[in-house]
Amino acid sequence: MLSNRINTLEFSAIRKLLPIANEAIRKGKNILRMNAGVPDTDTPNVFFEAISKFDENRLAYAPSNGLPELKNAISNHFKTYNLNYSEDEIFVTVGATEAINFSLLCLTDIGDSILTTNPYYSNYETFFNLAEINLDVFQTSIENNYDFPSKEEIEKSIHSKTKALLMCNPSNPTGKVMTKKEVEMICEIAIKHNLYIIADEIYRDFVYDNKEFISFGNYLEVADRLIIVDSVSKRYSACGARMGAVLVKNKELREKIEKLCSARISAPLLEQLGTVALYKTDKSYIESVTKEYEQRRDLAFNLVSKIPGVSSNYPQGAFYMILKLPVDDTEKFATWLLSDFEYEGETILLTPAGGFYKDDKQGKDEIRLVFALSQEKIERGIQLLEKGLEAYLRL
Ligand code: PLP
């Protein structure tokens, strides 16, 4: 007998489509993957250089809370955002994933709730299920470009079991960047209802149209109830390094995170050495990547707007956008694209957006598009989407 916890855990929609995609590849079809949030830019070479300089004969554990030189590099990096976190307020984690899981374990007991936006990053649901806590949501919508509802509306979802607000800014899956007003409103709500804020700001650098990114870290009045989650996966195109961090000022919370760090002994040593070099990378690297993503966003948005019957939001950050398609069920459509459609020997792998919503009935006519690909691939991908849609609607 296996646990209910694991038996009731669902594979993501992305994962469900993979066997069908593999079958299509086996039959000789080319698949353009516009589904996963994996940047196609190179990881800065300093990462590999730093690892190759390792000259010890033994791979020992690293200190549980992270290599001092890495925490120092993270601390200095955050100073460039005007955020002051000392080394003992920083914990190195295995990606943002572990950072979020640590936060949930510290803040909640079984049956507690955390409030986030609907739609949300689908893995949050997995983390919540494993921690046996409830995911509560407040609604945002494509029609309003995912702007937040009023304070009163958000407060309706807060109850005695609510422990924290989990804010993904800029957002995966929508590319929404919170306004200053929205950040301040969430701070006010957190103070009024005595909640923590978990700020998943891993896409903080990727903000477009000269829009200013407003971090929760800028608000000293919430400093004691704030956890900032960071990661090198997207910023430095280093998803495989599995390196992230938790930044926390609250002393009691730091002691608890320390316990979790030592329980899992250590984050990988070599990757930490490489990551020191990443955090020291000149800001010009991030600026040029952001400029490139902005052009990709422009291209994707313009091309998508020209497809009859398709609408989208206008993402100002990250590298995701939601598309509303003239179909009833995008999971069926995405499956059909893989199994029954090809254009010049090629098809496209998309992510149905249903998995980003709490209610199964929501997002059924939506997909998430990733524009972290080259402009050439974006053009081709959107062409395939258009051709596929035309053929599907003729069926
Ligand atoms: N948080 C968000 C919003 C993400 O989009 C992702 C990955 O796509 C993660 C966390 C996980 O990041 P990591 O690779 O650092 O574990």
Image (cartoon, rainbow, N blue to C red):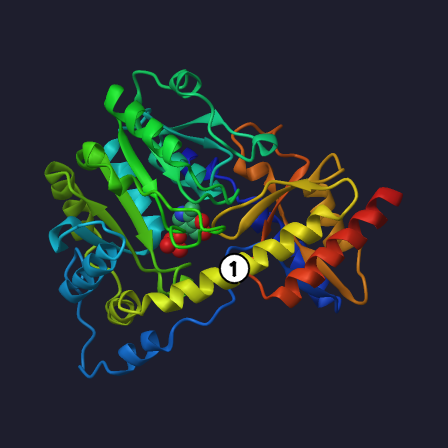
Residue at image mark 1: 293
Left or right side of 23 for 315: left
Above or below residue 293? Residue 301 is above
Instruction: Judge whether residue 11 can be spotted in this image.
Output: yes
Instruction: Judge whether residue 106 can be spotted in this image.
Output: no
* Residue found 10% across the figure and 40% down from its top: 251
Given residues 337 and 5, the one toward you in this image is 337
Q: Quadrant of the N terminus?
A: top left
- In what element is the residue under mark 1? helix
Left or right side of 94 for 148: right
**Farthest residue toward the right?**
394
Dividing the picture into quadrants, the one containing residue 56 is bottom left
Dividing the picture into quadrants, the one containing residue 134 is top left
* Residue found 41% across the figure and 36% down from its top: 179
As shown in the figure, which amino acid type bears the numbered disc 1? Tyr
Total numbered labels: 1
Give the percent coordinates (x, y) of residue 235.
39, 60
Above or below residue 330? Residue 347 is below
Q: Quadrant of the C terminus?
A: top right
Left or right side of 135 for 361: right
Q: Residues within 10 Å of mark 1 (few under 14, many from 20)?
A: many
**Farthest residue toward the front?**
210
Specify whether tag 1 is near ligand 1 (CB below 8 Å).
no
* Residue found 45% across the figure and 32% down from its top: 117
Give the percent coordinates (x, y) of residue 33.
62, 60
Give the percent coordinates (x, y) of residue 185.
35, 27
Give the percent coordinates (x, y) of residue 112.
31, 25
Left or right side of 310 for 61: left
Dividing the picture into quadrants, the one containing residue 18 is bottom right
